[in-house]
Amino acid sequence: MTTQFARPAGGSDRPRRLSAAEATRDSINMGPTVVVPPKHLMAPSDASEIATALEAARNQLDAPAPPGTPPTPPETTVTDKYAFAFDIDGVLIRGGRPIPEAVEAMKMLNGQNEHGIKVPYIFLTNGGGKSEAERCVQLSKQMEMEISPGQFICGHTPMREMAEKYGTVLVVGGEGEKCRHVAEGYGFRDVVTPGDIIKDNQDTTPFRKLTADEYKNSRARNFAEVKIEAIFVFADSRDWASDQQIILDLLMSKGGYLGTRSENFDEGPPVYFSHNDVVWSAGHDLTRIGMGALRVSLEAMFKAVTGKDLKTTAFGKPQIGTFQFATRLLQQWRKESHGIDAPPETVYFVGDTPESDIRGTNEYNEHADNSWYSILVQTGVYQKGTKPRFEPKATVDTVLDAVKHGIEREYKKQLRASMVQTGILTECFDL
Ligand SMILES: [Mg+2]
């Protein structure tokens, strides 16, 4: 038998997130412009070896079989027609544990399906607080499979594009020093944390004292001389009261110098959030408040204290820039790992949050050259029986059902196309 490499299919965030509830279409389009995926995300992985192995298998199968050779079992091939993109929290993971059907769904994409095809896929989460590489190691263990940083975008990944623009920045959120290290890994030249500021002046936060470890890890600076040019909320704040106090101090400062006050409160540095999900699906039965809630709170507080509106910027889904980034990542991933140098005709995006996953996918679908097909699962933020604020193309129970839905839909498309081609069906007949 002959097996074609990359033949067409069938041819033969722990979280739920409510996000960007009040974002306008303009604000979505004003998202960050990302030029190229970062180099380290493009690092070759062993997936290219899989592609090589497939090519070798193809050559072997194309060669005439010696007499007496037993029949070869069906070979797995990679589809070039479509791909999947997954949200993580509330889709694959919840409360730090895999959702039971997730492992099987990944196996199905890796070739364990009745059509014997492999389907390329990437992950697009609003979560963060760790480097992409660290998060991949964790997700690989949870999903019982190898996941490369070249398949992975988290909420703060596009922030790396801002590293050149600002000198000294305040980085907020996450555990210990992790986000400082992530920011430095992105190329930010001078990264300050709330700990550094409290270390310099412990009266900054009257009810928060640094632990011995925090004091040791925080860096000694004289903030009277430091101009903080921008504020980046990388991950969920572990201490809202002190983080908000420090952010507010800076927003009300004269040009980013702590200890100063602007007369009109319009000289503070800009503030960026890695996403805008108000709630997310964690281990608790009910949704938990997230970074979007901190944003809302900060804006309300700024208004209460200064009487003025605060303008903030959020990255992540549903921002168009994040989906553009995902498109480039997917294209690179398909090329490097599967040898496919063309965009997929359809990308199936599987998410649990109508406001970020479904909204972002649907709106990006209107801009993109190819088709982005939204699938909503019921294992996270979205609750069965309710009406989603943004309508998906399909609603299914779990991520496994989502994968089956996409593969089946593609199979039917192929079948229909070949039947039309051979004259069995007319164009207007829908299978
Ligand atoms: Mg989610």
Image (cartoon, rainbow, N blue to C red):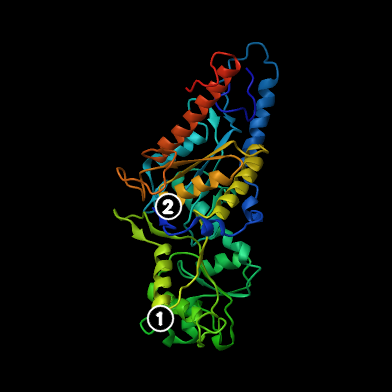
3D distance between C-alphas at marks 2 and 1:
30 Å
Query: Which residue is rendered at x = 64% and y = 53% of the image?
Result: 37
Residue occupying the far top of the picture: 67
Q: In the displayed structure, does residue 47 sit left or right of residue 206? A: right
Please, what is the three-letter code of the amino acid marked with disc 1?
Val
Density class for disc 1 (Cα within 10 Å; few <14, some 14-19, many ≥20) is few
Q: What is the secondary structure assignment of the residue under circle 2? A: helix
Picture quadrant where residue 345 is located: top right
Q: Position of residue 387 (x, y in %)?
A: 34, 45
Q: Which mark is residue 254?
A: none
Residue matched to label 2 = 355
Camera-nearest residue between 282 and 252: 252
In the image, 413 versus 330, the foreground residue is: 413
Q: What residue would you read off at disc 1?
A: 305
Q: Quadrant of residue 157?
A: bottom right
Query: Is 98 on the left-hand or right-hand side of 42?
Result: left
